[in-house]
Amino acid sequence: MKLVAIPAFSDNYFWLWHQDGHAVVVDPGDAQPVREILSREGLHLAAILVTHHHADHIGGVDELRVATGAKVYGPATENIPEPLIPALPDVPFQLLGQTVQVIDVPGHTAGHIAYFLPDAPQGPVLFCGDTLFSGGCGRIFEGTPAQMLGSLDTLAALPANTRVCCAHEYTLSNLKFALAVEPNNPDLQNYNAHCKSLRAQNLPTLPADLGNELKINPFLRSRTPTVRQSVAEHSGLSVELQNDDITLFAALREWKNNFR
Ligand code: ZN
Ligand code: FE
């Protein structure tokens, strides 16, 4: 099984995996870069997985379906181009010899889902769309802070060696914010230096390592004393409010929304 990040637009990645000449692509917001890799590598597109309804994730779905006959899986409750096979959390399915589990991760959008490959050969793989980013998380457009925190808690509980395939290269700007929240976190300082050098070589910082994210991503660390204290100070939360997990998480997300 080979896992490939296809860069697109200004900062998207369309993730593709292939095995024995067959491929699956996740969130193709544009057909062209996907068609290029399919023809260059001689791959047949078996399926398209969609995490949520935003245009930068579905813009290429129709063209790819018509060109290849690929089956399309996506969230049952969002407006995704038909015909669609609804991807449901209690119904795992098989693609190219891999078990695909569906995880509900509402928050960025109301019906956002993630796809998890628990048995992938070099360790589990997660395609999480715009829910979890390296060093950050998606903006809360349709859901609530409570939903987003619950979704991130679900993802944080996956195996630590999970490779996290995020849909955007937002890592450096996320880490700039993370360092404002936790300036003295040595793991964060080291990871920031590592990612800076990757980007200087025009290399992706992804997939991210879930175990590392637990050490550096403030949105997965909102209950740790350092993050809690930092957010409380920044947002002027009372002691009572700063001990409320959802209020604290909402204030952290709000801080990031306004951070430059
Ligand atoms: Zn989105
Ligand atoms: Fe997006």
Image: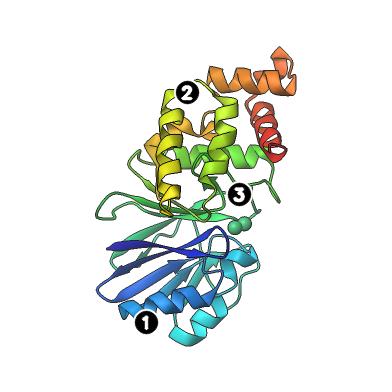
Give the residue drawn at x 51%, y 44%: 171
- Residue pointed to by mark 2: 185
| Residue drawn at the location 56% of the way across and 48% of the way down | 131
Residue 192: x and y in percent read: 46, 36
Q: Is residue 161 left or right of residue 232?
A: left
For label 1, the crowd category at 10 Å Cα-Cα, with few meaning under 14, some 14 to 19 and many 20 or more, is few
Expressed as whole percent of the image width and height from the top left, the position of residue 176 reads 57, 35
Provide the residue designation for mark 3. 106
Q: CA distance from mark 1 to mark 3?
A: 35 Å
Q: How is the image coloured?
A: rainbow
Residue at the (69%, 42%) spot, across then down:
144
Q: Amino acid at mark 2?
A: Asn
Lower sequence index among marks 2 and 3: 3
Pointer 2 and pointer 1: residues touching (CB < 8 Å)?
A: no
Quadrant housing residue 121: bottom left
When the figure is inspected, residue 202 is found, relative to residue 150, above or below; the finding is below
In the image, ligand 1 is in what quadrant?
bottom right
Category of crowding for the residue at label 3, using alpha-carbon neighbours closer than 10 angstroms: few (below 14), some (14–19), many (at least 20): many
Q: Compare residues 139 and 106 and report the one nearer the observer.
A: 139
Alpha carbon distance from label 2 to label 1:
45 Å
* Residue bearing mark 1: 39
Q: Position of residue 260 (x, y in %)?
A: 68, 38
